Amino acid sequence: MRYLLVLAFSSLLPLALSTSLGPRAWAQQVSLKGEKQLLKTREKQERNDLKLQHKYRKQSLKRQDVPRAVKIQMKHQMKREERELSERQKNERQDLRDRQRVLQESQKRF
């Protein structure tokens, strides 16, 4: 986590020094870049966690004598969870883009 913040800060520092943006605009850009990176990292971790959960569920179903209907139900449940995660992450990315757009428009006014 600390590494990501240091990386984001060190990569944006030369950009801030070379542009004529004010300190407030630069701070907002740093904030949005860091937020975007954190969002990507969190999304990747959530996807990996869900994959592991599904892997362990499948292994559990293979070890037990479970009726076919229950296996099908579990399979549908796992697909539903994947769709919900995908939709939630898509909405989070869109919210971030909307916030970026609002900030850019407010900077253009000043």
Image (cartoon, rainbow, N blue to C red):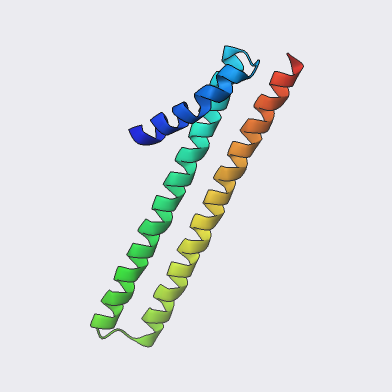
Residue at figure coordinates x 48%, y 69% from the top left: 79
Q: Is residue 59 left or right of residue 91?
A: left
Q: Name the one closer to the observer, 66 or 21.
A: 21
Which corner quadrant holds the C terminus? Answer: top right
Could you say which quadrant of the image residue 38 lies in?
Answer: top left
Corner quadrant of residue 16: top right
Give the image location of residue 107, x and y in percent.
69, 19
Label count reads: 0
In the picture shown, does residue 59 fall above or below 31? Answer: below
User: Is residue 9 found left or right of 22 in the rendered image?
Assistant: left
Choose top left, top right, bottom left or bottom right for residue 22.
top right
> 103 or 66, which lies in front?
103
Q: Is residue 105 left or right of residue 11?
A: right
Q: Look at 43% across and 80% down and name the residue there.
A: 72
In the image, residue 27 sits, relative to residue 39, either above or below, namely: above
Question: Residue shown at 68%/32% (left/top)?
Answer: 101
* Viewer can see residue 21: yes
Residue 57 x, y percent position in the rendering? 31, 71
Residue 2 place in picture, x, y as percent = 34, 32
Q: Position of residue 52 (x, y in %)?
A: 33, 63
Q: Is residue 80 left or right of residue 1?
A: right
Q: Residue at x 60, y 39 (%)?
A: 95
Q: Quadrant of the N terminus?
A: top left
Q: Is residue 1 visible?
A: no
- Decide: is 5 above or below 110: below
